[in-house]
Image (cartoon, grey):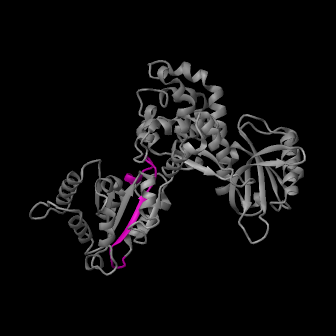
Amino acid sequence: MDKPAGMFDRDYEWAALSRFIADEQPGATLGVVSGRRRQGKTFLLEAACQAYGGFYFGATEATDAESLRRISDALTRHLQPHSPYHFADWSEVIDVLLGLGVERPIPVVIDEFPYLARANPELPSLLQNAFRPLRSERVRSRSRVLLCGSALSFMGRLLGGDAPLRGRAGLELLLRPLDHKLAAAFWDITDPLLAMKVNAIVGGTPAYRREFARSDSPSGPDDFDDWVRRTVLNPETPLFREARYLLAEEPDLRDTALYLSVLAAVADGNSTRGGVASFLGRKAADIAHPFNVLEDAGLLVRDADMFRDNRPTYRITEPLITFYHAIMRPMWDQLERPGSAARVWRASQQRFVGNVLGPHFEQVCRDWTLHHADPDILGDLPGKVGHGVVHDPRSRTNHEVDMVAVAAADGGKPRLLAIGEAKWNDVLGAAHVDRLRTIRDVIAAVGKYDVADTRLICFSGAGFNEKARVMAEAAGNIHLVGIADLYA
């Protein structure tokens, strides 16, 4: 299928979907498409149905009986039978959907499938039965049935463990947000400093530009502050309340106040369970469930400490949620009053840099190392990239390392490809390189990693002084990565 002209990127996803739909092999097949809200799943699937003459049904929050009436009407309009459909149960619906693909492969999309399954928990089992390998209705059909959903916790369980549909799906497609480079192109931003600032607020969610900001993109670096005030801090725009709605739309989140408090604690810089528990005035065991639910929902991610076992840290995956908790939530009453955005934004500059932009820049540097860095810089493709804390037993001090790249395991001692320092607002110099050298020596003494070929990488949004440049030119294992390099 030719990708629609209005679709930005998504080449990999479109190709995977095309292969699944156009597969000529006999027998109906089942696929699952998931991803957080606003990533373009519906646009992608509707475009596929239009390109291939398929059937699309978007479920809503409704009773089971109402959903049956809605899909009866939708199939009646699509097929125009002699008499309208009035399905009594979902088994009848599924057989009609399979019948759509008798003559040729055809996409059949059920969007927001979790709404249907919550109203009728038997639906996954009915699909399991319908897709039995030797069932005649399935054998005769070439319907490519695609179940789509935004509730990541539910969609993750759909094919896992002992779930009814485990082993039935021939496609599992996850739509992720655009990375920082694609997001800059999507927002039509060529200045890397401006691109990083915008990305730290809205991330790589496509809908935030086209629908939520009405294609309003900063015209240049000098327009950034005005752009923040007229979009995300403007009560008249959908972006203003989006971070709250993202949490409310997750079906597994019951006590939203507690989950909001956990996210606020993480946005405030408390990255461990103990730190969050202390922030909330609770015991660490009392907040285990909120952490697990937020992880399942894709709003929190757990990062392992690369040097200390069982010392994970947590970070928020959606930049807009971090921005909301760090900047907007503490000033919500003021922001709701028209005309207050400029004053709040002026007073929030230090917090924006320290709690939003700085941590986001560090994560982009790690993502760049894992997915974009030239293997010549690291000496090999990294198997894992993270961060961690190195303990020096001699001086009894801890050293935080912003970027740690480790080669894929090959049976021996793991090879430490690189360690790095990432600073958004600091001009890095010889002292930062010397600090990385000291940390590398401590790691060598501890003996957990092979550091024979470990590179030292300095990341900076503000640049490097002459001494650092001289050191990098003189030594082949020292690399300076500026903001422009991250977007090259």
Looking at the picture, how far across and down is residue 325, in whole percent? Answer: 54, 33
State the residue in front, 223 or 400: 400
Magenta-tinted stretch: 24-43
Quick check: is 31 in the magenta stretch? yes
The N terminus - image quarter: bottom left
Task: State left or right for residue 454 relative to residue 325.
Answer: right
Q: Residue furthest left?
A: 83
* Residue 279 coordinates in the image, percent (x, y): 61, 34
State the residue at coordinates (76%, 60%).
376
Name the residue nearer the viewer: 154 or 59: 154
- At horizontal 47% and vertical 18% (from top left) the residue drawn is 339
Identified at 41% across, 34% down, the residue is: 238
Toward the viewer: 66 or 342?
Answer: 66
From the viewer's perspective, tell me whether residue 470 is left or right of residue 312.
Answer: right
Q: Is residue 429 visible?
A: yes
> Quick check: is 461 in the magenta stretch?
no
Give the vertical position of 347 relative to 215 (above or below): above
Q: Residue at x 45, y 34 (%)?
A: 239
Residue 334: image x %, image y %?
A: 49, 20
Q: Is residue 100 left or right of residue 308?
A: left
Where on the picture, by quarter, is residue 246? top left
> Residue 9, how many percent across, how many down?
49, 54
